[in-house]
Image: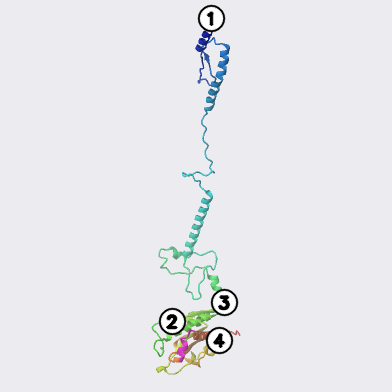
C-alpha cells in the first residue's frame, strides 16, 4: 500500500510540476529568460525540460530572424526603357528613325519653298531660258513682297547667264520667218471661199521654222505663231531688233476671177544690194526641186515687208490659192513638209555661200 501511495504522490507531484517559459522580447540581445516555478524539479524533469525547450527556442529565433527591415527600392537606371502604363516598352530606335524622317521632310519642304520663290540655287545653269526669250525666273526681292504675283518677273543673275551665252555664241545665224496676214487680215481666199491664205501660210511657216530650228547654228524668230494680226511695221521692227541675217515671208498667190495661173515664185526688194536677189534665187531653185510645181522664177517688187527691212529678205509665193490644182497640194500636210524643206535648204545654202562656207 505504501508503494502505491508513493506512486500516487509522485504522479500528483509530476502533474503539479509545470515548466513555464517566459520570453523577454525587450532585451536587445535576443536571449530568452526562463523561470521554473518549481525549484525542486528532478534531473529527469530538467533533462526533459531541456529537450522540450530546444524547439520553442528555435522558433523564437526564427521569428526574430525573419523580422527584417524593409529594403530600399532601387531607382531605375536612366538608360533603361521606362515602362508605359499599358506595360509596353518604348523602342528608342524607332523613335530616332521617326525624328530623322521628320527632319528630312522639313529640309525638303524648305528647299521646295525656296525653289518656288525663285531663290538662286548653288549650281550655275540650273535653269535655262528659251531661245525666244519667253521663259524667265522671278527675282528674290519681288517674291518677298505681298504683291509679288503682280510684279514684273526679272531674270536672276547667275542662273542661266553662262549657258545662255554659250548657246547664243554657238548660233551663227538669226533668221526671221514671217507668216503672212493673220487675225482680221485673212489674205486671199480659195475658189470654195472656205480656205484663207492666213491659215495655209501659218502652217507652212511653222514647218519652215521647225526645220531651221533643228540646226545647231540657227536661231529662229517668228513674227506670229497664232491667228492674230501683226502690222507690217511691227514685222519689220521684229527683224531689225533681232539683227536678222535673213527674212523669209510666206504667202500664197492669187489671181482675179479665179484664173488658171499656178506655180511657185519668189520676190525680192527693188535695187537690193544686200544679197536679197541671191537669197531669192537660192530659195526658188531649191524649193522647185523638192516639190512638183511649176517654177515662175524670181521677181522684184517693193512690198512693204521687203522695203522696210535692211537685211536679205524674200517673199515666197508658195502657189496659187485660186488654182484648184495648186490648192489641193497646198492643203496636203506631206506637200507642205516638202515645200518647207526646200525653203529651209535654199536659205541655209545662201547663208553658207555668203559666209564663204562650202
What secondary structure characterizes most of the magenta part? Answer: helix
User: Label 1, on which residue?
Assistant: 2
Q: Residue at x 53, y 70 (%)?
A: 161
Is residue 29 visible in this depiction of the protein?
Answer: no
CA separation in Å, label 3 and label 4 = 19 Å
Sequence-wise first label, 3 or 4: 3
The quadrant the C terminus occupies is: bottom right
Q: Which of the 4 image quadrants contains residue 53?
A: top right
Which mark is nearer the camera, 4 or 1?
Answer: 1
Q: Residue at x 56, y 20 (%)?
A: 54
Question: Residues in magenta?
Answer: 325-333
Label 3–label 4 contact, CB within 8 A: no
Q: Which mark is residue 350?
A: 4
Sequence-wise first label, 1 or 3: 1
> Which of 333/134 is in front?
333
Which mark is nearer the camera, 1 or 3?
Answer: 1
How many C-alpha atoms fall within 10 Å of the one at disc 3: few (<14), some, or many (≥20)? few
Q: Which mark is residue 146?
A: none
Amino acid at each position: 500500500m505504501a508503494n502505491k501511495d508513493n506512486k500516487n504522490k509522485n504522479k500528483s507531484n509530476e502533474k503539479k510540476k509545470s515548466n513555464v517559459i517566459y520570453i523577454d522580447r525587450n532585451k536587445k540581445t535576443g536571449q530568452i529568460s526562463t523561470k521554473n516555478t518549481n525549484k525542486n524539479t528532478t534531473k529527469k524533469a530538467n533533462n526533459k525540460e531541456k529537450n522540450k525547450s530546444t524547439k520553442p527556442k528555435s522558433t523564437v529565433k526564427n521569428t526574430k530572424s525573419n523580422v527584417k527591415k524593409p529594403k530600399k527600392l532601387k531607382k531605375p537606371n536612366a538608360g533603361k526603357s521606362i515602362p508605359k502604363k499599358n506595360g509596353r516598352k518604348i523602342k528608342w530606335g524607332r523613335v530616332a528613325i521617326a525624328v530623322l524622317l521628320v527632319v528630312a521632310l522639313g529640309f525638303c519642304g524648305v528647299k521646295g519653298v525656296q525653289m518656288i520663290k525663285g531663290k538662286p540655287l548653288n549650281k550655275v545653269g540650273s535653269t535655262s531660258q528659251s531661245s525666244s526669250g519667253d521663259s524667265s525666273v522671278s527675282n528674290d526681292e519681288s517674291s518677298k513682297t505681298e504683291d509679288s504675283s503682280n510684279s514684273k518677273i526679272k531674270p536672276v543673275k547667275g542662273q542661266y547667264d553662262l549657258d545662255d551665252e554659250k548657246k547664243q555664241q554657238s548660233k551663227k545665224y538669226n533668221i526671221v520667218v514671217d507668216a503672212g496676214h493673220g487675225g482680221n487680215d485673212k489674205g486671199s481666199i480659195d475658189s470654195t471661199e472656205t480656205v484663207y491664205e492666213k491659215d495655209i501660210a501659218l502652217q507652212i511657216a511653222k514647218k519652215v521654222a521647225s526645220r531651221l530650228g533643228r540646226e545647231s547654228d540657227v536661231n529662229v524668230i517668228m513674227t506670229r505663231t497664232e491667228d492674230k494680226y501683226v502690222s507690217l511695221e511691227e514685222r519689220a521692227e521684229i527683224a531689225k531688233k533681232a539683227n536678222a541675217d535673213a527674212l523669209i515671208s510666206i504667202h500664197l498667190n492669187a489671181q482675179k476671177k479665179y484664173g488658171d495661173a499656178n506655180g511657185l515664185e519668189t520676190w525680192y526688194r527693188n535695187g537690193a544690194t544686200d544679197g536679197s536677189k541671191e537669197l531669192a534665187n537660192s530659195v526658188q531653185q531649191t524649193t522647185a526641186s523638192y516639190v512638183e510645181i511649176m517654177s515662175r522664177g524670181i521677181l522684184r517688187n517693193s512690198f512693204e515687208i521687203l522695203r522696210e527691212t535692211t537685211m536679205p529678205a524674200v517673199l515666197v509665193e508658195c502657189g496659187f490659192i485660186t488654182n484648184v490644182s495648186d490648192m489641193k497640194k497646198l492643203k496636203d500636210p506631206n506637200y507642205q513638209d516638202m515645200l518647207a524643206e526646200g525653203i529651209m535648204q535654199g536659205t541655209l545654202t545662201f547663208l553658207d555661200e555668203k559666209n564663204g562656207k562650202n
